[in-house]
Image (tube, rainbow, N blue to C red):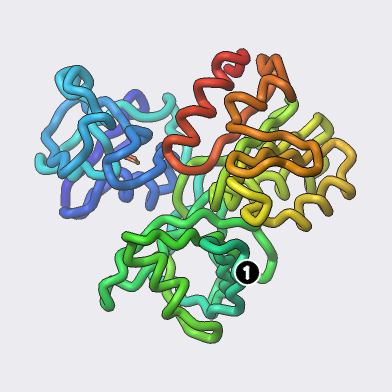
Amino acid sequence: MKKIIMQPSGKEIDCPSGETVLSVLEKQGYALPNNCRAGACGECKIKVLSGEFDQGFIMDMALSQEDRDRGYGLMCMAKPTSDVLEIEFGTEDAQPKLFPPVENSWHIVTDKIQRTEKILELRLSPLGQGIKFWPGQYAMIGDESTGHPLRPYSIANSPKPNGELSFLITKEREGKTSPWIHEEVNIGDNIKINAPYGTFLGDPSVDTPILCLASGSGLAPILSLLNAYLSRGHKNPVTLLFSAKTKADLLDFGKLKYLESKYVNFKYKFTLTQESNKEGGLEGRIEKVLPQLLSDLSNHSVYIAGGVSFVNSCKKIVDKLGAK
Ligand code: FES
């Protein structure tokens, strides 16, 4: 058994061999930002103060040579190889914040609903105890025994007492897991999931206007966060701007219109990028339409979810508009 020591707290955690630093931290309830869990996004970058680790296969754009030279590593892929790995992590207290993930939790498929041509909603109910999670977190779904690798899917609902979970699954043409879910997993099947993971969490104490930007199945974690904020009585304006190619791609249109009529502080806006908006609404990519809606984001909390290029272009424009 190897050890990971977190500094400046000096807390030690055991690391079974073969486990990544990220998975060990999460099992102990420590939040480390991450997105892809595959060495591609750079979100899980951390400074390693001493010790050796196997970085595994990662993409150069996720960790520059300069960062490597300065001792940084990507913890979603890093496996300690020395007895002790000392990392820079958290505060003096290094307080546990997240629910530890549960592995191989049996759930039954209660529904599959085709939401758009490529995206279906998968609903699961727990056969045992429900998974505890924070809005914005995700589950790993797949069946490695039949060649369908575990893939991260955001939970699209806020926590429910009966433990029901829903997911928006985009069918990836080249993928193995999403076509399996679309075509082979049936209502009534029992499947295993690992959850919860991720730190795309809303701050319950936030007291600012909120802006959410989403496209495609990136709407899933945003829906979970929105429901949580609105249902606990967030008083400031909450705006969702959803980007879709065509009107047929407007996921959960009815549900979002319902939320808009229920909560006076919630505004639902959408923009179409590949079709004209016949109702005179917004047209074009987020970077073009956002400044027309909100020209100053300096006091907003901003959440963005979607594909990598969507997230990157949204980040650029929200930075330009003053988001901190
Ligand atoms: S989570 Fe994306 S690189 Fe580690």
Residue depicted at 55% across the width and 60% down the height: 168
Q: Amino acid at mark 1?
A: Glu
Residue 158 visible in rendering: no
Seen at 19% across and 17% down, the residue is 66
Q: Could one spot residue 90 in this view of the protein? A: yes
Ligand 1 resides in the quarter of the picture at: top left
Near-viewer residue (75 or 82): 75
Which one is in front, 171 or 265? 171
What residue sits right under mark 1 in the picture? 164
Q: SS class of the residue under badge 1?
A: loop
In this rendering, position of residue 283 left or right of residue 261: left
Q: Residue at x 70, y 15 (%)?
A: 296
Q: Quadrant of residue 201?
A: top right
Q: How many marks?
A: 1
Residue at x 76% of width, y 51% of height: 256
- Residue most extreme to the bottom: 188
In the rendered view, tell whether residue 282 sits above or below residue 290: below
165 to 192, vertically: above or below: above
Q: Position of residue 186 (x, y in %)?
A: 50, 82
Mark 1 near ligand 1 (CB under 8 Å)? no
Task: Classify the position of the C terminus by image quarter.
Answer: top right
Viewer-proximal residue, 317 or 104? 317
Residue 309 screen position, x and y as percent? 43, 35
Q: Position of residue 2 (x, y in %)?
A: 17, 47
Going by the image, does 120 lie left or right of 241?
A: left
Q: Residues within 10 Å of mark 1 (few under 14, many from 20)?
A: some
Is 270 positioned to the left or the right of 25 in the image?
right
The percent position of residue 313, horizontal first and vertical second, equals 49, 28
